[in-house]
Image (spheres, rainbow, N blue to C red):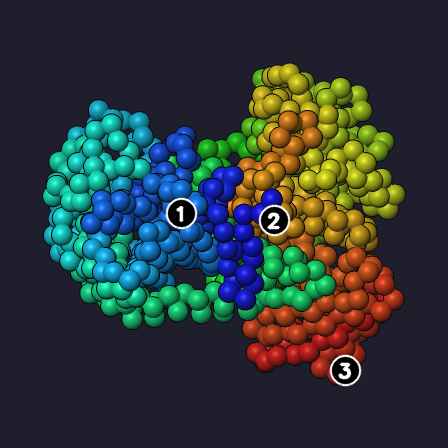
Amino acid sequence: MRFGYFDDAKKEYIITRPDTPLPWINYLGVDVYCALISNTAGGYSFYRDAAHRRILRYRYNNVPSDRPGRYIYIRDNTTGDYWSNSWQPTNKDLKKYKYECSHGLSYTRIKSEYSGIASETLYFVPLGESLEIWKLKLTNKTKKKRNLSLFTYVEFCLWDAHNDMTDFQYNLNIGQTEFKNNAIYHITLYHAHNNFFSYFWSNTKVSSYDGVRQSFVGPYRGEANPIAVEKGRCSNSNACGWAPFGGLHVKVNLNPGKEKEIIFILGYAEKSGEELKMMDKYSSVKNVELAFKELENYWKENLNKYSVETPDKEVNTMVNIWNQYQCRTTFNWSRSASYYEAGGERGMGFRDSNQDTLGFVHQIPQKVKERLIDLASVQFPEGRAHHGYSPLTKKGSKEGYGDDHLWLVMAVSSYIKETGDINFLNEIVPYNDGSKGKIYEHLQRAIEYSWNNTGWHGLPKAGHADWNDCLNLHGPNGMGASVMIAEMFVYCANLLSELAEKSGRVLDVDKYKDMAMEMKERINKDAWDGEWYVRAFDDAGNVVGSKKNEEGKIWLETQTWAVISGVAEGERAIKCMDSVKKYLYTQYGILLFQPAFTKYNPSLGYVTVFPPGLKENAAIFCHTNPWAMIAETIIGRGEIAFKYYKTILPAAINDKADIHWTEPYVYSQMIAGRDHKDFGQAKNSWLTGTTAWNFVAISQYILGIKPTFDGLIISPCIPSKWKGFNVKRVFRGVTYNISVKNPDGVSKGVKKIILDGKEIKGNILPILKDKKEHNVEVLMG
């Protein structure tokens, strides 16, 4: 069942009915201001940090789950009837109410028509601004003059998201608003005097207002039937305690066939007077339209760095638009704010943010460099890292995860391969205690921390957890060991050896190669189970992920990373990936492991708490699926790699939205596994490492255009039925127009590469520095 369709020309997903299985959302803002908006205008906003600069309130565990939001009520002053521009929250009969929502790149447009009045509301955040714009256009489609009133619903958060929902004896007594400059100002001081404030303004004269939620909504009412809208007038209330609110009342008279545009701005400011400049600037519809055009051009420029033409339309839609868009969004906000990550604690995940750079570095490398510096600065001097940090204060949170620090090695290597900025290794960056070291030294300490902290069989200790947050192997002996971390170590130690070679640190080249080789031998000696690699050893030394286990016999992560890292070669690589296909692949994706756990096991932790088939307990954890795609291309099986890719591709699931539930234009973190009654139902969309890794899998391994220190390597691994494909790839300022031909119907293998009419040796495009366009012809065979 479909709820919408893709419009690739406009780079939009069009939702044709508002009653989607879950709120289908979008993210507005590409810099410091973020606004989440659903297809019915639910959602919240924040400045930089969703925990400490929350602007709009989000009610946790609410029904519907996107309440409240940025609502505009339209009232017919003649009849007293009223409705909302976004269907919610009044929920008019869909037989009488027309609706359409277009989610675009950092903007959302909602159209509706009811009682002869058409409305179109464009929501977006202008580039470089700390505000969101609501541009409403009303059209009278009747033959009589219409006397209308508009009312807005803006529920301010008391800045600190966690405290806002818990400490009511405090919160109900500190909220403050005032009305001036045709705007409601939210000026709550909260814990201490501060200079920042938010404001909600219109370019049209305000007839009445409410700065207190209770005054606007009324007793025993809600967003669906506020007393102010029903009466046709606000009470001009200002908050001094209770819940601060932004209710503006604007009158509109429309002659037959006429239209009117009205601007609303919700903004954040840190200096008095800043907001007046914004009000003046955006009082003009023309300036609003110019700002929107700038936003469109911004995305056109960014997406122009990488585009494809393949025989598969759904691949083209996702790779050219939505996968890259989701990569940017996830890079911006890590795991700090969605309808699943509530924005009260997690902030910027260390492991998460390093992985997020992998799918975004080709768009704006400078931003990735800045993020890597941030990440390195929350590393401990001994090499381990905080699990996350606040984007506002840069203060680290949580620690003790065995894998976090290793992802920094991958991210830095990826950045340097993309940019050629080998001198980044010499940049001096602090550790979390204030001491300093070169980026290269940060990477060294990450590798050496894992090398020096080993448990059973000489494998790295898992700590609280490895990549799988819910596989908790720590115990009184402190010996729980992760095979996945060991495989990651092999991969990262080899990367550091390459970085040492490229940066002239000759003494370190063999040192890290030897570490990698030693760890590889340990894994193959003690972690091979005959058909696959085991997952771990618990604190008592018991094996996890073996034929010996009744539950959790085979796990996906250690098969894929064995191949990716080079731990598994030849027959073992094929055998462990055959086991993945045999035991873990399903029609909706690859399961994390099998069989699911059915009872709690304290030696394994939270993974055994979830119901079978959900989250880390044998669900389809989509983050891990692209690792299987990558592994299959490494062993040359393009058909299987592409099959895995298409199985979880959002655009390919558009017709199954009633089963899948989450948005069909972005990846989700997990899909319920076959052990669960809701097999195929997804959760945790948007902010997930799934998006970066899927972009890496399709762009670098299936299509096979991969950055290296020495140039772009061309090594596709595709379905044999494909006759070819085209890729436009900007690499180090040079545009490569790559045309791949596959006349012999192979999955892998390159016979010949012609660059600007001349055949080159090998399959690596040389680094060119002329900043021009170059044509590349690739012949597979």
Residue 406 as seen in the image, left or right of residue 585: left
Residue position for label 3: 758
Q: Is residue 239 visible?
A: yes
Q: Earlier in the sequence, mark 1 or mark 3?
A: 1
Q: Which mark is residue 654?
A: 2
Whole-angstrom CA distance, mark 2 to mark 3, is 43 Å
Q: Nearer the viewer, mark 1 or mark 3?
A: 1
Q: Quadrant of residue 241?
A: top left
Q: Amino acid at mark 1?
A: Lys
Whole-angstrom CA distance, mark 1 to mark 3, is 65 Å
Image: 50 above or below 455: below
Residue position for label 1: 96
Q: Amino acid at mark 2?
A: Asn
Residue 555 as seen in the image, left or right of residue 258: right
Image: 12 above or below 571: below
Q: Amino acid at mark 3?
A: Lys
